[in-house]
Image (cartoon, helix red, strand yellow):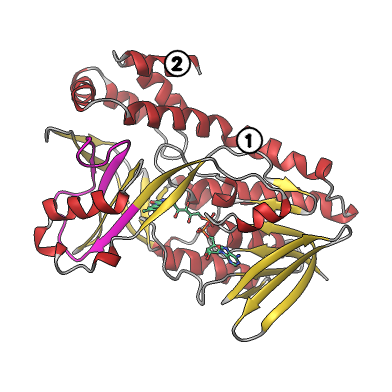
Amino acid sequence: MNDVIVIGGGPSGLHTAGLLADSGLDVKLFEKKNRIGEDILCTGIIGKEAFERFGLKEDSILSELAYMNMVSPSGTSLRYDHGKVFACVVDRKKFDLNLAHKALSCGAQIFTGTRVENIRNAGDYIEVSSFSKKRGETRHRAKIAVLATGIEYCLHKKIGLGYPKNYINGAQVELDVINGEGPLIMVGSKVAPGAFAWNIPVRKNRTRLGLITEKDAAFYLKKLVSSLYPEKVTALESEQFLSKIIAQGPVSKTYSHRVIAVGEAAAQVKTTTGGGIYYGLLCSKIAAETILRKFPTDSFELSDLSEYERSWKKAIKRELLVGYFARRTCGRLGDKEVEKLFQLAKTNGVFPLIRERGKFDWQVDLILELAKKASIPSLKTLIKI
Ligand SMILES: Cc1cc2nc3c(=O)[nH]c(=O)nc-3n(C[C@H](O)[C@H](O)[C@H](O)COP(=O)(O)OP(=O)(O)OC[C@H]3O[C@@H](n4cnc5c(N)ncnc54)[C@H](O)[C@@H]3O)c2cc1C
C-alpha cells in the first residue's frame, strides 16, 4: 500500500508528487511515455512570476519576453513594450525533467513507460492497474490517487470525475530560421480564426510558430508557415504539423472518493491563451495541501475532498470564465472590428493600462478594463460578468 499514486508525469503530476514526497508521503508516479519530457507539443511560455512562486529552476529558460509585436488582419503592426520581462520561454523537456529530479530527490518513485489502464475505488484504498513492457500488468494500491493525465480523460469516466465540454485546437512547429522580428502575435480570420497565432524566437536561429483556433489548427499552421517561410514547407513532413486539443474549463467534479484531478486533467488551463503550466502548478499545490491536511486521519471521503475544488475555484474560476468569454467574443469579431481595436490600442491609452494592470497569468482585471474602453458592443457585455 502506497500513500499516494500520481498518474501522469507532466508539470502538474510531477509538481504534486514532489510536494507530497517532500512532506514525507510515500509517492509513486506512473507516466506512459518512455521518458519524462518526451514528445511535448508546447511553446513553453510561462509568466516570470512562476519561477519564484513555485521555486522553479531557471536553467530551462531559453529566452525572456519584455515586448511583443502584434499584426492586425490587414498587416498593421503595433509594438507593445512592457518595460520589464513579463514571461519566459522554456525548454519544456528540461523544465519537466527539473520537476522530475526534484520529485525523485524528495523520495518519489517515478515509473516511465507505464500506462495506467484502470482505476477502482475499493473503499479503504484506491486500486490502479498499469501496464509496462518491462513488468507487464501490475496492480498498485494507495490511500489516494491524483489524476494528472493532461488531455486524456478515460480514467475520469471510470471513476465518475467531470471532464471538459469545450476545447480549442493548438498546433506548433519549431523551425530553424532566424526570426528577426522578435516575438509576434498575429490575428485575423485568415490566420487563426477564433483566436491567434504566435511566432516566438527561442534561440538565435530557432523560432516557435504556433496558433490556437476553433478548428483545423494544423491546416492554418501549414498555411502560416507557407506565407512566412515558404522554403520550409516542403522540407517539413506533413506529420510535423501536429495539433492537439486544449481543454477549456472550468469543470466540476474534479474530485471523487480517494481521487483528485489536477492540471489539464481538471481543465485548469488559461482560457484566453490555452497556457496550462502556471495554473497546473498552482492547483497542484492546492491539491497537495489538501491531501496533506487530510492524510493523518485518512479523510478522503467526497465531503473531505470537496474543499480542494472550492479552493482551486476560488483561486482561478473567475479567470477561466471571464477569459473564456473574452476569447470567444474577440474570436467572433470580424476583421474590420479587429482593425478598430488596433486603432484604439494606438490612441486610447491602452498600452499604459496594460503596463500598469497586465499580469501574464492573471488577466481578469485587465480584460474588464479593456472591455470598458472598447467601443464594440459585444465586448461591453463582458463588464457585466
Ligand atoms: C500548441 C500548444 C502550445 C502550448 N503552449 C503553451 C505555453 O506556451 N504555455 C503554457 O503554459 N501552456 C502551453 N500549452 C499547454 C500545456 O502544454 C499544457 O497545459 C500542460 O502541458 C498541462 O500540463 P499537465 O501536467 O496538466 O498535463 P500534460 O503535460 O499533458 O501531462 C500529462 C501526462 O500524463 C501522461 N498520461 C496520460 N494518461 C496516462 C495514463 N493513463 N497513464 C500514465 N500516464 C498518462 C501523458 O503521457 C502526459 O505526459 C500549449 C499547448 C499546445 C497544444
Q: Looking at this view, is 32 or 367 the one in front? A: 32
Q: Looking at this view, is 360 or 231 the one in front? A: 231
Could you tell me residue 228's position as x and y percent? Answer: 13, 52
Write down the region rendered in magenta.
171-199
* Residue pictured at 38% horizontal, 47% vertical: 169
* Residue 173 seen anywhere in this rendered image of the structure: yes
Q: Dot 1 corresponds to which residue?
A: 313
Could you tell me residue 300's position as x and y percent? Answer: 83, 50
Q: Which mark is residue 383?
A: 2
Q: How many other residues sit within 10 Å of disc 2, few (<14), some (14-19) or many (≥20)?
A: few
On whether ligand 1 comes within 8 Å of the CB at mark 2, the answer is no
| Count of residue discs | 2
Mark 1: secondary structure = helix
Left or right of 173? Residue 309 is: right
Q: Looking at this view, is 214 or 92 the one in front? A: 214
Most extreme residue toward the left, as rendered? Answer: 231
Query: Do the numbered discs 1 and 2 sit on residues whose CB atoms are within 8 Å?
Result: no
Q: In the rendered structure, does residue 129 fall within the stretch colored magenta? A: no
Mark 1 and mark 2: Cα distance apart in space: 20 Å
Amino acid marked by disc 1: Lys
Most extreme residue toward the bottom, as rendered? Answer: 134
* Residue pictured at 46% horizontal, 25% vertical: 365
Mark 2: secondary structure = helix
